[in-house]
Structure formats: structure tokens, C-alpha cells
Amino acid sequence: MAGRMAPDGRRAGRRLRDLTLCTLAAVLTFVSFPTAWAPELTLFPLIWFSHVPLLWVLKDKAPRAAFGWGLYTGTVINAGGYYWIAELLQTFGGLPTPVAALGLVLHSVYQGLMWGLWAWLLNRIGNTTRVGVEWTAPLVMVAVEQVLPRLFPAYMGNSQYLFPPIMQVCDLFGVPAVTFLIYRVNATLYLWLRARLEGRDRPRRAALATAVMVGGALIYGGVRMAQVDAEMEAAPSLTIGIAEADVGIFQTEQRKKIDDHLLILQRLSAELADAGADLIVWSESAYRYGFLRREATRFVPSDVPLAPDAQADRARGTPDRDRAAPQRGFRTPLLFGSTSVRRAEQPRWEGDGHVVPYNTAWLLDAMGNIVGTYDKVYLLMFGEYVPFAKVIGKWIYRWIPAAGNLEAGTDLKVIEADLWDVGPVRLGVLVCYEGILPSFVRPLGAQRPHLLINMTNDDWFGKTAERYLHFALTVPRAIEHRLPFVRATLTGVSAFVDANGRVRKMTRPTDPETLMDRVPLMQSTTVYQVIGDAFAWACLLLTLGFYGWGRLRRR
């Protein structure tokens, strides 16, 4: 009996060890991104050795066990990184707490498949070919990141958004290049650890190659940043102001702040105008006094002085047209977001109305003339639209009343305006979710904008780390296109990011605030703009090639 119990005890001990190591790897990974513990900081250096414990667990596992431990690690990573999904589903989806928690679990398990597939492919390729883990670990992760569809796509390389020197390779190969370097370093550290503990030959060649890759990336980053700094200094510029009213989603916001939201924005904008702003930017959904008609050509500014609050405005008898004017108290060009509507001849589905809403950005000149508009093209599933709504809309909106019913725009385009003494300026406007999608933004970069402006509303996710995570996922767009990046949000985090990906200024996720900065007007062509995700697709082809080679060798 004692003899049989001893192996069982050893197996239990190994499982506990493996569970501990995989949990450690998961925690080290998700705290490298913005978290509830340190949203504005992140512990981004940790990800460079976060996967060493997981690689140690995988070294002697069968394929099925490798997949399982990878899936467990990935599930914990995503549960820690996307914990706020449960709050979103509960607060705005109206789902009971157990159902919201289940939604978080399902999302975490699905996205955890990235690590399950990664671990399984590492095992299969490693056991059937002579390709070392220092190559397979980075290649396979880049490949899996590229092909697995995700609702909130994040690359592991996004963790380094506060480390600009390593991020500069994004203008060559995109964020996947940073992911590659991270996993290359992890694999090399693992090989050194294994060599030390198991008496193996030290992986000097692998370490030298890794040092050359990382060192080369850092040298390139330093040189490139100096070049772009000189270009920014020489470029013409606009002084841009961001007004962040900190008035959240009306379903959860205080009644008085809802009532005063437009006046708050206008007071902040008047301050920016007085300080010399050439252009003022509000966020997505900033204007909520009512829906704006798509056929409008001008929103007449109001000359009525700003009131202390909406109640005082009503007491004064201020006409509704003045209270509804976007530009009041200032005469500066304004870029702002709102819901625009057009009449529909018939409902889009049973139960739909005769008004079709769009998520629209409007650019007004100093006299309120509409200079240009952009309708959000890439809508967020369920939050802004329901797939197959024409088929299932008649019942899905009864089950989830908060589900979105927006119509998508049809044209990804720049807004060009000749309103300043620097000549025509081309604004690359991205609304919310669009800013985190490299392949979506790339065609916009090809239209030669002078800067990118991301207007977003993150209040759906509450005062959580999501606001910083969303910001982290957008920062690489500045480097990929070598353009300044202006981000205006409803409740934070608004920011100015330069063309090197450095965060120049940013707001807090509390209280009304303004930001103002000199923004150079640049037009750039980068390698990434030309080749796109060719690096990631090459990693996928190599992964498939190694896997296929291994299968042939086994026959």
C-alpha cells in the first residue's frame, strides 16, 4: 500500500508544482499590462521572463497535457487582464452577477486558447524536429496572435507601450515584432535555467542571437527616435486642446452632471480657446443634447453667455437652440462626436424604428459650418451592433435591451480642412475601437493624414484598468505611421502621444480636465505601411512549415 501511495504522492506534488508555476507565469504576464492594482503604471519589464515558469512545466509534457497547461495559463492571464468584462455585462448588459461571471469565464477560456495552441505546437514541433524552443516560442506566439479572432485583440508586445525604445520596430514590422522579441528572451532565459539546473551545455549561440536581436532593436530605436524628433521639430504645427468633461454614460451618471454635460464641455473649451487652441477636440459621444441630423450643413454658434449650470440656463429663459449649440462661449474649430440620424423608409428589422443612427465625428469651423464628417466603420459587436440583426433583431433586443443598433459607416477616410494658416490639414479620425486595430488603420495611413485623432468612450467599462489598457493598445499606431496621436475620451484616459510613441500628456480618469499641446503636422511613409503584417504572416508560414516537417519526419 505504501508503495502505491508514494507514486501517487509524487504525481500530486508535481501537479501542485506545475499549477504553481503556471499561475506564476499567468500573474507575471497580466500584471505587465494595466491592471486594477497599478493601471497607470504597469509592470511591463516582468513579461520578459514571465513565461520561463510555463516553459519549465511544458518541457516534459505529452501534447495533450501541454495544451491543458497552456490553456490554464492563458485563461488566468485573460481573467486577470479582462476582469472588468464581468462589470460591463452586469452594469450595462443588465445580466445577473452569476451570468456576468460566466461571461468573463467563457471569454477568458476562449482567449486562453492562444496559450493552449502555443503550448501544443511548441510540444509537437519540439518533439518532431530539431528546431529549438528559442525559435518556436516566438514564432508560434506571433502566429497564434495573428490568426485567432478576438473581441479585444491585444498583442503581448503592447505591454511595452511605456518603453518607447523597444517599440520603434513597430514602424518596420508592427507590434508582432515586439511580441517576437519578448518570447525570444523568455525562451533563452529558460534554456539557460535548464542548462544550469540539469547540467546541460549552456545555450551560448541562442543567447548571442537573442542579444543581437534585442540590441539591434534598441539601437534602431535610438537612431530612429532621434530622426523623428528632428522631423517633428521642423514640422509646422497646430495647438490642439482636448476637453474632457468626465460625464459618463447616462445610465449610471449623476443627474446633475447629465443635465450640465454640454455646459461643462463648453466651459472647458472656452478655457482652451482663451489659451490659444487652434482646434478643440471632444470625445466620441460627447454631444448628447440630442441626435444631430445628417443632412445639416451648419450648427449655428450661440452668442448667449455661458450659464453656471443648466438649471440657471433654464431660469434665464435661454432659447433651446442656444442651449443645444455645440459652440457656445468660444469660436474655435471643433471636432466632436455624437449620434447622427437619418430617416428610414422602413424599419431594418421587426421592432426597429424609422430612424437609423450612426456614430459620427463632426468637424466645425469657427462659424459652425460643417467642414467634414466621419461615420465609424468598424462597430463593436453587441455594444454597437448585433450580428444578423435583420434576422434575430426582433427578439435579441427584447432579451438584451442595451445591445447597440448603430449603422456602420461605409468609407474610411480622412477629414481635410483648410482652416488654419498652415494650409490644408488632413485629420485621420478613428472612433473608439478602431484605434486598436493595426490592419484597419493601415489604409487610413495610406491616405496621408497629418495626424491621427482617436475619439473614444471607455465609460462602458467603469473606472477600471480597461481605460489604460485601451490606451496601451492604441499607442503603437503613432509609431507604425510616424504620426502624432491625439486621444480624446469621455471620462479618461485622454492623451497626446508623439510620433515616437512617447506619452507627452495624459488625463486622469476622474474630474473634468483639459489638455493642450503643440502637435506637429507630419506625413510619413513607413515600412509597416507598405508591407503591413507580412512579418506576422511569415511567422505563421514558418510555424506551419515546421509543424508539417515534423509530421513528415514521424512517418
Image: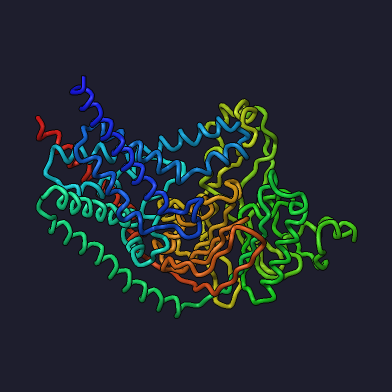
Residue 232 position, x and y percent, is 44, 75
Closer to the camera, 458 or 378?
458
**In the figure, 98 relative to 199: above or below?**
above
Q: Which residue is pictured at 14% across the width and 47% down the height?
A: 198
Q: Which residue is pictured at 56% across the width and 73% down the height?
A: 517
Q: Residue furthest top?
A: 1
Residue 74 position, x and y percent, is 37, 40
Q: Quadrant of the N terminus?
A: top left
Coloring scheme used: rainbow
Q: Quadrant of the C terminus?
A: top left
Number of numbered callouts drawn: 0
Q: Residue furthest bottom?
A: 234
Residue 450 visible at all: no
Closer to the camera, 196 or 176?
196
Residue 233 position, x and y percent, is 45, 79
**In the figure, 297 relative to 554: above or below?**
below
User: Which corner quadrant of the image does residue 5 belong to?
Assistant: top left
Q: Which residue is pictured at 69% across the width and 66% down the height?
A: 268
Residue 356 position, x and y percent, is 65, 41
Say left or right for 40 vs 541: right
**In the figure, 322 relative to 505: above or below?**
above
Residue 410 visible at all: yes
Say left or right for 547 vs 146: left
Q: Residue furthest front?
A: 2
Q: Which residue is pictured at 14% across the width and 51% down the height?
A: 195
Closer to the camera, 377 or 15?
15
User: Which corner quadrant of the image does residue 551 belong to?
Assistant: top left
Closer to the camera, 454 or 261?
261
Say left or right for 147 vs 381: left
